[in-house]
Image: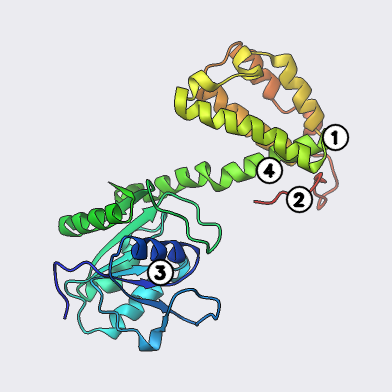
Amino acid sequence: MKHANRIDVAVIGLGNWGSSLVAALNRARVPLREIVVRRRKRSSPYPTVLWTKAALDARILWLCVPDSSISDEAAQIASCHSSLDNQIVVHSSGALTVDALETARRAGAAVASAHPAMTFPTRNAVPLDGVLFAVETANPATRRTLHSLVRKLGGKPFDITSENKALYHAAGTLASPLVVSELTAAIETARLAGLDSKTAARWVESLARATAKNVFARGPARSFSGPFARGDAGTIRLHLQALQAHPMLADIYRSLAVHALGALPVQNAQALVEALRKPAALKSDRPAGKQPKRASRMRN
């Protein structure tokens, strides 16, 4: 029987995020009806059921699957029940809207997304205490239910609209995986300068940790220092001359620098703009089909 006021959960998918959600549900003593998987894995620390045996009768059916699978999983849920009245189908994509759950909505379910602003790099459970959750739904009662559940898990819910989802997720990508890419570029540049791998990583870490701490304690403008803040165009030219042989790193440097000129306090701005211009010598005069050689392969 489906009770409108009951809060219990079925988790569908047990990847990196699903593993953390299951751990948080157990810790918060929220009733976990079942964990539904396509294939059982011997290494799973939790009892699971296959799709063919799933009851799918929990009040909240929480999809923890890749974005590309969400619509298909929602359709399979809808095909298993003649009605999903009084049930809520939730996905955790930061980019896709609730429209990905349209088949479940047509079957009577309330639909929503609840995206945790956290990184889940492995299946080791990440605590959800203090994690911000972006909740997207057009249904006020569903919003209240999910806000309550997120708080039980230790999270902090806030609302996001469907039309702003893509920008919201772009911000998250800039805040986490692309930060990894930028730090990787910094480490690679330090290694090109002759530092060994261990020293390069420690050197970048010491600067990055202090900078991140300052940004969130003092604000970006009061944390911005170095040659751009001073307006030292000569130093910028030296950097770019050194990076000429490494075009990928030079492009990363220029892109971040151009953003800094518009978003952060700099001196001698026009001279900095001129210093950042690509010299004519860098324009491609290679035979067609040949690509610039990179120092080493960047990994994210």
| Mark sitting earlier along the chain (3/4) | 3
**Front of the two marks 2 and 4:** 4
Q: Distance between the residues labelled 3 and 1?
A: 47 Å
Observer-nearest of 81 and 118: 118
Label drawn at residue 184:
4
Label drawn at residue 57:
none
Q: Is mark 3 on a helix, strand or loop?
A: helix
Observer-nearest of 30 and 72: 30
State yes or no: discs 4 and 1 in contact (Cβ < 8 Å): no
Identify which residue is drawn at 16% across, 55% down.
140
Q: How far apart are marks 2 and 3 (CA)?
A: 33 Å
8 sits to left or right of 40: left
Instruction: Inspect the image, locate mark 2, and give the three-letter code of the amino acid beneath it.
Output: Arg
Picture coordinates of residue 181 (x, y %)?
A: 63, 45
Near mark 1 (Cα within 10 A), the count class, few <14, some 14-19 or many ≥20, is few
Picture coordinates of residue 237 (x, y %)?
A: 75, 21
